[in-house]
Image: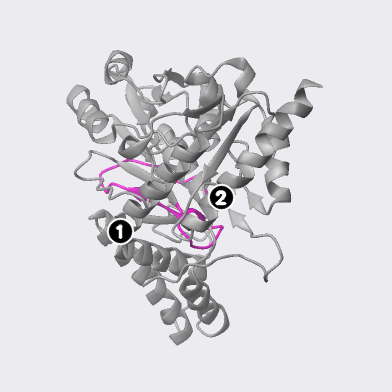
Amino acid sequence: MRRIYRKCAEMGKKMEVYLDNSATTGCFQDVAAFMTHIMCSDYGNPSSLHLKGVQAENYIRYAKETIAKLLKVSEKEILFTSGGTEADNIALIGCALANYRAGKHLITTMIEHPAVLQTMKYLEEQGFHVTYLPVDNKGRIRLEDLQKAMSKDTILVSIMHTNNEIGSLQPIAEAGALIKKMNPRTLFHVDAVQGFGKFRIYPKKMNIDLLSASGHKIHGPKGVGFLYINEKVKIKPIIYGGGQQNNLRSGTENVPGIAGLAKAAEILYGDLDGDVDRLYELKQRFIDGVTRIDHVKINGYTGRESAPHVISVSVRGVRSEVLLHALEDRGIYVSAGSACSARKPQPSATLKAIGVEKELLESTIRFSLSVFTTEEEIDYTLQALYDIIPMLRRYARH
């Protein structure tokens, strides 16, 4: 049984509740201990020929075996990266550069993570043409729009599995089948950073050619991720050097991080169904409670049509930044949208794409759960919202 942590101070002090798990998650203790052992004892360079090097290489082999088994793919199809952003960049830029003679048309959606959207903008500057698919008011693409956008020049389609802001799920299997039916040579990339560890994703079955994931979203370490690349995909490296990882990503491998990523995935998938069922129950408990407050709106789908861990809440009359800091004063940590941008927060492209009215664009908070989240924390947060929102609305009217 996984140990559930309650970040609660001694009696008389406020509880600490972390509900920003779409930004990053707390590391499993077993993962941290595993990585510490590797860093302090089995610290060899995996390219070295001596015993220390072999020990390090064995951890990479363990990680490849673990992840390949979870995805039902070959070990040689797993490439380790510094995280989801690099995995997305390698997939998009590497495939665009390798396949441009077949066409220069790319397709993605309007609600992708910046790691995809900004990379697509870069590729546009390099002469590629990008189609950005719209979504419905719940954040889901329409397959007919994808079909209309496809052409003989389409070399790659990139669609995220799970939206990081509102938790919408895309019809990945259906999209994959459609893409391959229309043009078997078109590559299909899926950003599964928010989906891996919450769903069973099988690239071969779903016609996915490339899939990105990240360690720190699944209770593993920051600074590590992976990219699944179907062995038939033509792709160029974007990092050059010593030729590690079959010349696709040069640089000494982050052995503790890679091993920690695999260990975290192993733990999560050990009781995936039970964990996901409990997350959906906690999510519904929160939605039932927060929608009792007047003029509060949930963005996107709810229930099993959405991710089990992401809840986007718009609170009319209260700016998100003000509510975020008011909750922080109660020891509750949430996000005002995606936490993956170093720039000053801008109005969410995802919220705009689903048609959220202008007044609510800057009045939206994301609550995101994890396997560590408890009913006690949900109820504590709801009570805080019951206290805080009416007070902030009174101040806003003055």
Q: Which residue does the numbered mark 1 point to in the structure image?
A: 274
Return the residue nearer the eye: 30 or 102: 30
Look at the numbered disc 2 and give the secondary structure of its residue: loop
The reply to whether the magenta stretch includes residue 268 is no
Q: Which residue does the numbered mark 2 point to in the structure image?
A: 19
Query: Does residue 145 appear in this view?
Result: yes
Label the magenta part by its dominant secondary structure: loop
Highlighted range, magenta = 214-239
> Which image quadrant for residue 323?
top right
Q: CA distance from mark 2 to mark 1?
A: 20 Å
Q: Does 358 appear above or below 106?
A: above
Give the quadrant of the N terminus: bottom left
Which residue shows up at 36% across the image and 35% down it?
Answer: 169
Return the residue nearer the eye: 158 or 333: 333
Q: Is residue 385 left or right of residue 145?
A: right
Amino acid bearing label 2: Leu
Which residue shows up at 71% across the image and 66% down it?
Answer: 12
Which percent across, then down, holds residue 8? 62, 65
Which percent across, then down, holds residue 68? 28, 59
Amino acid bearing label 1: Gly
Whether pointer 2 and pointer 1 mark residues with C-beta atoms closer than 8 Å, the reply is no
Q: Residues within 10 Å of mark 2 (few under 14, many from 20)?
A: many
Which percent across, then down, holds residue 344? 72, 33
> Which image quadrant for residue 314?
top right
Q: Is residue 361 left or right of residue 268?
A: right
Which percent across, then down, holds residue 226? 42, 54
What colour scheme governs how the chains and residues are painted in the rendered image of this protein?
Answer: one colour
Q: Does 295 appear above or below 187?
A: above
Look at the numbered disc 1 and give the secondary structure of its residue: helix
Q: Residues within 10 Å of mark 1 (few under 14, many from 20)?
A: few
For marks 2 and 1 on the same chain, the one whose residue lies earlier in the sequence: 2
Q: Residue furthest right?
A: 398
